[in-house]
Structures are given as structure tokens and as C-alpha cells.
Image (cartoon, grey):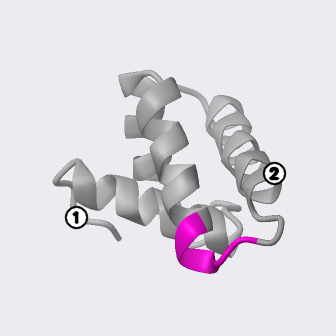
């Protein structure tokens, strides 16, 4: 995938985080984002967003980053 496609995925996760954040506890929001990614994203999309964690500042907002780290852990991938 290209850098532009990676940035699109980052943007999408940040939007999901913003939509699920309203009035929830942080842990619930992170779990909701992670669950959404697990249920609705294709394997390749999940692999790319997890790979984004290796970049120092890939653009993930804090809640989105936490959710992607959790996704990585659930997939057995060491998070950077």
C-alpha cells in the first residue's frame, strides 16, 4: 500500500475514535474502536494500520493509537 493509502487508514481510525468518544470512559472507547476494526476491516487494512505504529508520528490520535496497539496485541504482533 502507498503512503496515501496508509494516511487514509489513519484518517479513518481517527474518525472512528472521534465518533465513539462522546461521553464514554477511555477504556470503553478504546475497546469500541478496536472491536470495530476487528469486525469491519479487512485483514490487509488491519495489517497496514498496525504497521503504522512503527512510524514515529503516523498521525494517529491518542485514543486511536491505543486501539491500534490493542489490536496488535490481540493479533499477536508486538506493538512498537
Q: Vertical placement of 48 versus 69: above or below?
A: above
Start-end of magenta stretch: 24-28
Image-quadrant location for residue 61: bottom right
**39 is higher (above) or lower (below) than 26:** above
Residue under label 1, please give it.
78
Residue occupying image coordinates x 37% and y 53%: 71
Q: Residues within 10 Å of mark 1 (few under 14, many from 20)?
A: few
* Residue 31 image point, x, y percent: 49, 60
Task: Give the residue at mark 2.
Answer: 19
Q: Residue at x 22, y 64 (%)?
A: 78
- The reply, left or right, for residue 11 in relation to residue 79 is right
Q: Secondary structure at mark 2?
A: helix
Q: Is residue 20 above or below residue 2?
A: below
Q: Earlier in the sequence, mark 1 or mark 2?
A: 2
Q: CA distance from mark 1 to mark 2?
A: 27 Å
Q: Is residue 80 magenta?
A: no
Principal SS element in the magenta part?
A: helix
Residue 26 located left or right of residue 27: right
- 66 lies above or below 51: below
Question: Comparing marks 1 and 2, which lies closer to the viewer?
Answer: 2
Identify which residue is drawn at 44% across, 21% down. Answer: 42
Amino acid at each position: 500500500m502507498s503512503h496515501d493509502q496508509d494516511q487514509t487508514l489513519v484518517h479513518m481510525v481517527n474518525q472512528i475514535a472521534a465518533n465513539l468518544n462522546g461521553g464514554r470512559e477511555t477504556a470503553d472507547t478504546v475497546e469500541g474502536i478496536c472491536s470495530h476494526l476487528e469486525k469491519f476491516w479487512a485483514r490487509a487494512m488491519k495489517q497496514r494500520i498496525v504497521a503504522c505504529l512503527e512510524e514515529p508520528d503516523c498521525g494517529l490520535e491518542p485514543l486511536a493509537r491505543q486501539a491500534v496497539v490493542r489490536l496488535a496485541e490481540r493479533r499477536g504482533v508486538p506493538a512498537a
